[in-house]
Image: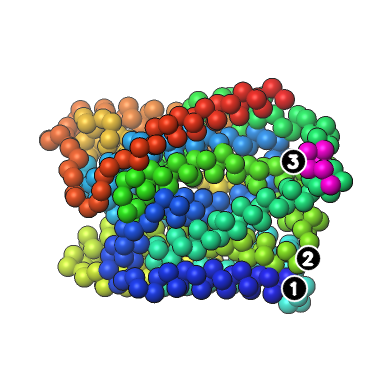
Amino acid sequence: MTFLSFLLFTGFVAFYATYQLRKDKLNTKDGYFLGGRSLTGIVIAGSLLLTNISTEHLVGMNGSSYRNGAIIIAWEVTSALALVIGALYFAPRYLKMGLTTIPEFLEKRFDGLTRTIVAMLLIISFVATLLPIVLYTGALNIEAIFDISNLLNLSKSQGIWVTILIVGTIGAIYAIFGGLKMVAYTDTINGFGLLVAGLLVPILALLAIGEGNLFHGLGEVFNNSPEKFNVISTESGVGEGARSAILPFEVLFTGLMVNQIYFWTMHQSIIQRVLGAVSLKEAQKGLLYTGLLKILVPLIIVLPGLIAFYYFGDSYYDNPDSVYPILVKKVMPLWLTGFFVAVMMGAILSTFNSALNSAATVFSLGIYKRYIFKESSDQKLVGIGKWTSLLLAVFAIGIAPFVANAPDGLYQLLQQLNGIFFIPIASVITAGFLFPRVSAFGAKVGLCFGLVFYVLMYFILEVNLHFVHIWGIEFVLNIGIMHLASLYRPTKERFSIQDANVLDLKPWKYAKPFSLFLVLVTVLIYFLLGNV
């Protein structure tokens, strides 16, 4: 029954996406890499949610909330603020320029070498951090629920290897043959499935705890450990213990928002959906709908961890990443388990596919066409994109098993590694828009300084600062260094955004009121849950 429900849902998603793409031209540059610039708000929102939420969230964040409480919620609800900035500021400018990739903007604003450096950093970050962790957490979840190792008479580590290989292969096939639009359509269906299946876990658990009364069950969980529901951490981000702190409240005002703005407004795998929008109106809808979903998502990726503490106490503190699959097995009826694993598979594939597609886009258009074969046809670029996806998938599958046993949990490991790449790129893109005096030379110096600074401070000198504080310091220093370097080699001409006349740039009339609503709800969450 479990395998049947798994196959039925997975088969439906594949059939639906293939049917929707039956008339699409996937052999053109825009058709393959940007979904033919035809994505609507609902599709963009569903795809953004699934690109972001994967098993590193379901496993990693629930594991963190189980051990550390609801302070981890900051990664989610502050995303709404970044998405507001994306909808009101960045999306209109990206779409006006008719961009295909973010590095393309850097070439327009600075020069081709800056674009190439950032393109290479993006590809390395996908292969070295995101893809392996997504594959490993996905395999961990599927192994724990389906018990693959026992089914195949293997050791647990071998079972995880096999699962990584299978999931990685399926993901590569999706990304290689379907392009962005295949990824976006499968994301939309899987996004709906994730919301349903993800909500079922806490609902079924709370109904069981409350003996049929959902709110009584929530009250029982709350009364068991009210301190776990506090969203404001008392940890210190400076001094002794700062390095092992999970998320001190003060980091919300230093590096956290820099990271959020980068991820939701500048990260290629995210913003590629916006670049594929049919109009500015639909792009803004997609971003702001995602903001609303991000505020609700803690019900799926934080609350189950708090429920797990009610059930298991601190018995899994040494291995928090195992607690979510164990909770699922405890509360989910057997006949629904297959559907749940299918949705998990969809979440893994979504993030994996999106990263592969984005990396292929960046390499094909930013490196291959620029340096290797400048006269490439659209068909040639699509072919190179497919080969790039295949090679990166192989690398990621090979690296994935080695991310096991992260001391502070897999989600924390992902964020720590992201700082190597995210903040230098964020500072250069920000300077490109906000500081016209920053030159191409200044941008390159800032990139190099940022990369060295974070690695030196966090991994070599091991200063007693929380890594998110280091992000904030690095960002400010990068902006300063870029200005100083630009005095040595100043920019020759002032950059201005030119309209590429690619699509309708009329904004959504409800964009500003919806944005205000998201900001108020985010502040209200901290006001209500900050003193529990």
Mark sitting on residue 334: 2
- Residue occupied by mark 3: 306
Query: Position of 512 compared to 204: left or right?
Result: left
Is the stretch drawn in magenta largely helix, strand or loop?
helix
In this orientation, does residue 392 appear?
no
Is the C terminus in the top left, top right, bottom left or bottom right quadrant?
A: top right
Residue visible at 50% across and 33% down? 518
Name the kind of residue labelled 2 in the image: Leu
Dot 3 falls on a residue whose secondary structure is helix
Judge whether 349 appears above or below 202 on screen.
below
- Residue drawn where x is 35% and y is 73% of the image: 23
Locate residue 357 relative to residue 58 in the image: left or right: left
The numbered mark, 3 or 1, whose residue comes first in the sequence reads 1
Q: Are marks 3 and 1 in contact (CB under 8 Å)?
A: no
Residues at circles 2 and 1 in contact by the CB criterion of under 8 Å: yes
Q: Secondary structure at mark 2?
A: helix
Amino acid tagged 3: Leu
Whichever of callouts 3 and 2 sits on the residue coming sooner in the sequence is 3
Residue range (magenta): 212-217
Disc 3 vs disc 1: which is toward the camera?
1
Which dot marks residue 1?
1
User: Residue 231: x, y in percent?
Assistant: 65, 30
Give the residue type that dot 1 points to.
Met
For the point 38% across and 39% down, the residue is 87
Q: Are marks 3 and 2 in contact (CB under 8 Å)?
A: no
Helix, strand or loop for disc 1: loop
Residue 20: quarter of image? bottom left
